[in-house]
Structures are given as structure tokens and as C-alpha cells.
Image (tube, helix red, strand yellow):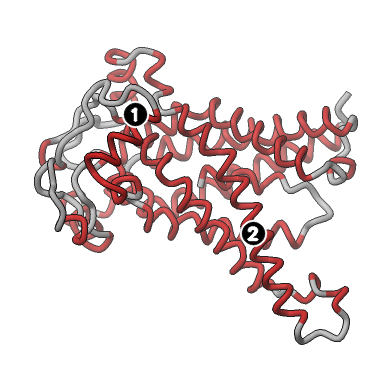
Amino acid sequence: MEEPGQLKRAFIDATAGSISGAISRTVTSPLDVIKIRFQVQLEPTSSFALLSKNVYGASKYTGMIQASKDIFREEGFSGFWRGNVPALLMVMPYTAIQFMVLHKVKTFASGSSKSEDHIHLSPYLSFMSGALAGCAATVGSYPFDLLRTILASQGEPKIYPNMRAAFVDIMNTRGFRGLYAGLSPTLVEIIPYAGLQFGTYDTFKRWTMAWNIRGLSDPTHAEESLSSFQLFLCGLAAGSCAKAVCHPLDVVKKRFQIEGLQRHPRYGARVEAKAYRNMYDALSRIMRTEGWAGLYKGIVPSIVKAAPAGAVTFVAYESRKSRDSDGIYSLNKL
């Protein structure tokens, strides 16, 4: 039986997570829109890549500054917030499901519903609890993620005037399964992303502690010598490394999400229906036709958007070690 205090805390944490997630989504929406435009563009997205053979034709976007100017000129200020409504709607079920599943799994693993007992779980069980919670939350909120990508990827003139029009078209052309296009690479990305974040963060933290030990007379207090700024830098580096390694899966996910959907010719070639058989086929085809650069389209705005947020989360996590580390696992959705 859940204790009233635990249920109240879970509700408060979920609500706080939803509000902070909504604010973060809204503030970083311009970077998200640029990232998505890069990821779904089959043509090269950098001047360097344009030097190579381009099998698709002229590129619409070739850099962050150029893309920002084009979006503002053609779509106005509101163009940077395309798809923000489904993005905000995604935050609420994602956060609620994540906290609920995480608490349930940790309760099952520890045999207690008390958060103070969850702290004593092994790193392995803690990580697996977070991974399962992330997977469950992703499945529960995924249709909103897909709608966000579709609306953010279109420019002017709009193919879909609103979220309802996009939803109706997906149901008519793809059916219910279409709402979960690209789910496989998303779920595959969660575990290595979280693992790399924790692993690289601990590595950078150890290196920083070793550096600090040189000026300490008592090495036993090395961890206490780490400043918030140093923890922030460690989190920033960890988030950047995790994004760099897992970004190709995010590109594949976006391609599956817009596969076969309408796209105005001025934005370049579109991803045709059933262009990729599966995740492995998508990776190999992108690699073959677009090169390594194709797998990393949108990596710069992705890191600029997500890495600082991840760093802040790690600093917050360190400052409240006596409590659950539930919030860490929501980084994958940033």
C-alpha cells in the first residue's frame, strides 16, 4: 500500500517536472526546429558537405545562421515555435508516466515504497529502473513527439495547418501504427544514452577530483572539493559525448517519423514511403547516400540545446544526493 506522503510527493515531483519541462521546451524550441529541419533534409546541411557529390540537388539549409535567417524571413518569429503545442503536450504524459513507473520499479526492487530506501539500490538496479521508466514514458507520449516533428519540419506554405490535420492525415495514410513510426530507434537510443551520460560523467568527475587532489592536504575530502562549476563542466562534457554517440539514431527516428508525408518542394527531396526497411537499413542507406555527415545532421543545435540542460540536471542531482535521482532520466527527452 502506497503511503499518502509518497503519493503526494510523486504528484508534486511529476507536476514540477512537467512545468520545468514545458518551460525548457518553449525556450529551446528555436534550436529544436532548426535541428529537425537539418535532420529531415536529405541534402547536405554544411558548406563542407556541399563540396562532395550531392545526389539530391540544392540544399535549403546549410548552417545554423543561414537556417535561422531563412526561417525568420519566410515564416516570421512564430516559425521558430512550430510544433511547440504537441511538444508541450508530450511533456505532461511523459513526466507523469516516468515518475510513476520509476517509483513502482524501485519499490519492487527495494521491497519498500519509501524513497529513502530507494537510495540504497545498486547502481545497476537504479540504472535499469531509469531505463524502464524512460521506455514506458516514451511509449506513452510518443504520438505527440511524432506530431511535433511533423509540424516543426514543415515551412511555408504549410502542409498541415494544425496538429489535428496532421493527426488525421497520419491515420488515413499510415493507420494507428503510423503514430509510432520511429519508435524502435528511440527505445534503442535510451539505454546507451543514459549509460553514456552516467559513465562519462563519472569519468570526468574522477579526472577533476584527481586534479583537485594535487592542492589538497587531505585526499579523503576530494569529492567535497568539487565546485558547482566543475560539476557543471563535467555534466556538459558528459551530455555532449552522449549526444554525439547517439545522434545517428535520432536522425533515423526523424526520418521514420516523416516517411511518406507531404513536404513542399522548396524544402528539398522528401523521404518517400517505405524508404527504409528497418533501423539498420536506414543507417546504411543514409551512410551510403549522405555520408557520415548525414548521420550527424543537426548535431550542433542538438548539443547546444541539450548539453547545458543535462549539465544543470547533474549539478542539481549532486546537490540533493540524499533524495531520489529521478530527474536524471528525463534528459533523453530534452
Q: Is residue 214 above or below residue 325?
A: below
Residue 27 place in picture, x, y as percent: 44, 55
Mark 1 residue crowding within 10 angstroms, few (<14) / some (14–19) / many (20+):
few
Tag shown at residue 44: none
- Please state which of residues 275 and 324 is positioned toward the viewer in this rendering: 275
Q: Going 20% across and 28% down the picture, which residue do you hit?
A: 262
What amino acid type is highlighted by mark number 1?
A: Asp
- Please state which of residues 239 and 76 is positioned toward the viewer in this rendering: 239
Q: Going 64% across and 65% down the picture, which residue do you hit?
A: 204
1 or 2: tag closer to the N-terminus: 2
C-alpha distance separating marks 1 and 2: 32 Å
Tag shown at residue 201: 2
Residue 273 position by quadrant? top left
Query: Disc 1 on helix, strand or loop?
Result: helix
Q: Going 29% across and 51% down the picture, which residue do you hit?
A: 293
Query: Disc 2 on helix, strand or loop?
Result: helix
Tag shown at residue 281: 1
Q: Going 31% across and 49% down the picture, which residue do you hit?
A: 292
- Quarter that holds the N terminus: top right
Residue 63 place in picture, x, y as percent: 24, 59
Q: Is residue 86 left or right of residue 15?
A: left
Q: Is residue 105 above or below residue 302?
A: above
Residue 136 place in picture, x, y as percent: 61, 28
Residue 146 place in picture, x, y as percent: 39, 31
Residue 265 position by quadrant? top left
What amino acid type is highlighted by mark number 2?
A: Tyr
Select label 1 or label 2 by which is in front: 1
Mark 2 residue crowding within 10 angstroms, few (<14) / some (14–19) / many (20+):
many
> How many discs mark residues in the rendered view?
2
